[in-house]
Image (tube, rainbow, N blue to C red):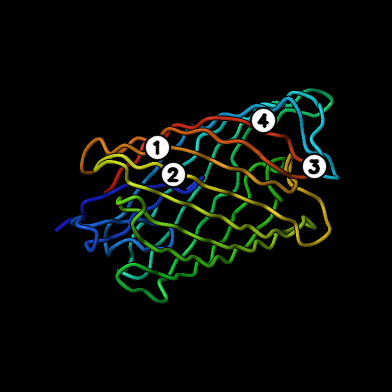
Amino acid sequence: MRRNPLPFSRAALAFSVALSSFGLATIAKAGAWTEADGEGRAILTLRGATADDYFDSAGDEAAGPTFRKDGVELYVTYGVTDTTTLVVQTAYVDLHPDSPAASASGWDETQIGVQHQIWATDDQVFSAQLSLLAPGNRDLTSGGADWEARALYGQAFQMFGRPAFIDLELAYRWRANGYADQLRPELTLGVWVEADLMVMAQSFNTFTTTSGADQYFEGEQSKVQLSAVYRVSEDVALQFGAFTTVDGANTPAERGALAALWFDF
């Protein structure tokens, strides 16, 4: 019998977890929770952002050239077994900074990863994921094969009498061609305010851990995102949200919005 999907998301990327203890038939999520054997989820996201200022090397916000970034992202998960999930993510990006910086368009990195559940209880789970990031456009990526190791922890609970969950993730990315390695902590809090409506608060962070070049228009940064996911049917959901860069170094102070289509299969 197919699960009753309750969609959720991570920047990019998608969540789903089971929580019968809270009176729901199932609660699902993909972050730290793996997909069931033979089941999957695809999320197609449209994302657009602009910046009129930036964070300098000291982390101070200053007026700067206008920057625009648009993209289409695809995130797919598939349960190879009940405890092992295949993860694939890719994006097409269109960057338009003011001169003298050059515009760039093309495929970003394509992530291919395997996530394995190490430990789980009725309301908690711990998983690990190893991913290869294949290069896309040389102006948008390191131009070589990057690797990432990720630890994921999820817990379901009640908040204000409603089903909720928290997802904590910590990733380390080894980058090619002399680009700076990165530490990537992420946090997601989701609350089901109605049976078919969930609100999420998320934090996405990138910190460099070695010396070296930075990715095109990317330094250290901390972003926050607020969004809502509405389940249209058993297999389809819609997500709408906004995000902003709240801190960083050598990075645009981006502000933008997103819209996503979720489909379970």
Q: Quick one: SS at disc 2?
A: strand
Residue that badge 3 annotates? 250
Residue position for label 2: 200
Residue bearing the label numbered 4: 95
Spot occupied by residue 206 in the image (x, y as percentages of width and height): 67, 52
Mark 3 or mark 1: which comes first in sequence? 1
Q: How many marks?
A: 4
Label 1 close to label 2 by CB (< 8 Å):
yes
The three-letter amino acid code for the residue at tag 1 is Ala
Distance between the alpha carbons at the discs numbered 3 and 4: 16 Å
The spot of residue 159 in percent (x, y) is 36, 53
The amino acid type, in three-letter code, at marker 3 is: Asn
Where residue 230 appears, as percent x and y from the top left, is 31, 37
Q: Quadrant of residue 101?
A: top right
For the residues labelled 3 and 1, say whether their Cβ atoms are less than 8 Å apart.
Answer: no
Comparing marks 3 and 4, which lies closer to the viewer?
Answer: 3
Q: Residue furthest bottom?
A: 119
Which label was assigned to residue 134? none
Q: Residues within 10 Å of mark 4 (few under 14, many from 20)?
A: many
Please give the name of the residue rendered at 76% of the width and 62% of the height, measured from the top-left corner.
Answer: 209
Q: Amino acid at mark 4?
A: Leu
Q: Nearer the viewer, residue 165 or 94?
A: 165
Label 3, label 1: how far apart the Cα atoms are: 30 Å
Query: Is 174 above or below relative to 103?
Result: below
Displayed quadrant of residue 174: bottom right
Element under disc 1: strand
Residue ID for mark 1: 228
Residue at x 69% of width, y 55% of height: 144
